[in-house]
Image (cartoon, rainbow, N blue to C red):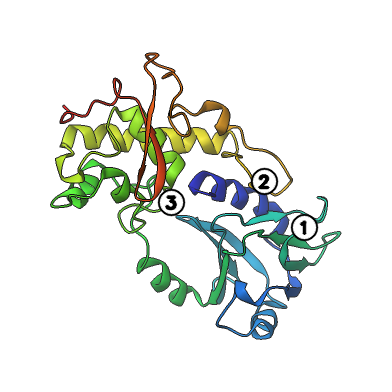
Amino acid sequence: MPELPEVETVRRGLEPLMVGRVIERVEVLDPRLVQPVDPRGVELALTGREVTAIDRRGKYLVVELDDGELVALHHLRMTGSFAAPTQPVPTHVRLRYHLAGLPGPIAYNDPRRFGTLHVDDADGVRRYLDARLGPEPLGDDWDAAALHARTRGRAAPLKAVLLDQRVVAGLGNIYVDEACFLAGVRPDLSADRLTRAAAERLVTAVRARLLEAIEVGGSTLRDYRGVEGEVGGMQERFLAYGRAGLPCLRCGTTMRGARIAGRGTSWCPRCQPATRPR
């Protein structure tokens, strides 16, 4: 957390607040956010810049300044979030953006302090992201052929491959479990046993669950909130994530659970058979 739908929800919340406004002042309150760069240098670099666009790449927020002359690249990691000026002041603020025309600062909050801020020009940020991320799951560059090709010769569990951001950007624990259930594929299946037909189902399922989650504002389990403090609704629609030991919502069979790639994982032994997918 947050995964692609949550980051996209934050992006949509920040866009009307920031785009077209000039950053009057930046306060980096926790040096770990920008390390090993000097926080004062980051503050000076961002001050006076106009926010011209806010995009998303995988789980990264891409804040373009002065038409890409400079870019502020935020990764929320496990507990990062932004709060609009109208919201109560969060308890673990690590950065504040003061923008012209707003009644107060936009606060970046991060209880566990794993979030990062990387500042560079557009070309530098593009190289940074291209070295770390594969295609977007909602984009035209990712399809069943691309997924199937990346699983060839890989004996790792399918879930571990899907969590690899270089295979596909933006997926995490929640939506991998959800997509595997919807596709009828076991998350512990050896990746090299994934058939082309199963890859087709899986790509379709990934997109369906991501789009549904974006529509309802993502999943709120602990810390995640939207920019205006709104709670996501996807946690009310989980089919697999966190349901180990509970009846399958589709067939009633008791859901099973295990740790795969270091993550708690749930699946239905009937809806997601252990045999080679058709």
Amino acid type for the residue under numbered disc 2: Gly
Amino acid type for the residue under numbered disc 3: Gly
Question: How far apart, in angstroms, are the residues tagged by discs 3 and 2?
Answer: 18 Å
Question: How far apart, in angstroms, are the residues tagged by discs 2 and 1?
Answer: 16 Å
Residue 219: quarter of image: top right
Instruction: Name the residue located 68 percent from the left edge and 75 percent from the top edge.
Output: 49
Q: Can residue 212 be seen in this view?
A: yes
Q: Relative to 142, is 193 on the left or the right?
A: left
Residue 43 on image: x %, y %: 69, 79
**Image: 273 above or below 139:** above
Residue 218: quarter of image: top right
Q: Relative to 129, is 74 on the left or the right?
A: right
Residue 114 on image: x %, y %: 57, 64
Outermost top residue: 252
User: At numbered mark 1, what does the secondary structure look like: helix, strand or loop?
Assistant: loop
Q: Mark 1 points at which residue?
A: 91
Q: Is residue 141 visible?
A: no
Amino acid type for the residue under numbered disc 1: Thr
Q: Mark 2 points at which residue?
A: 226
Q: Mark 3 points at which residue?
A: 170
**Foreground: 45 or 83?**
83
Instruction: Name the residue located 24 percent from the left edge and 25 percent from the top edge.
Output: 273
Residue 36 on image: x %, y %: 55, 82
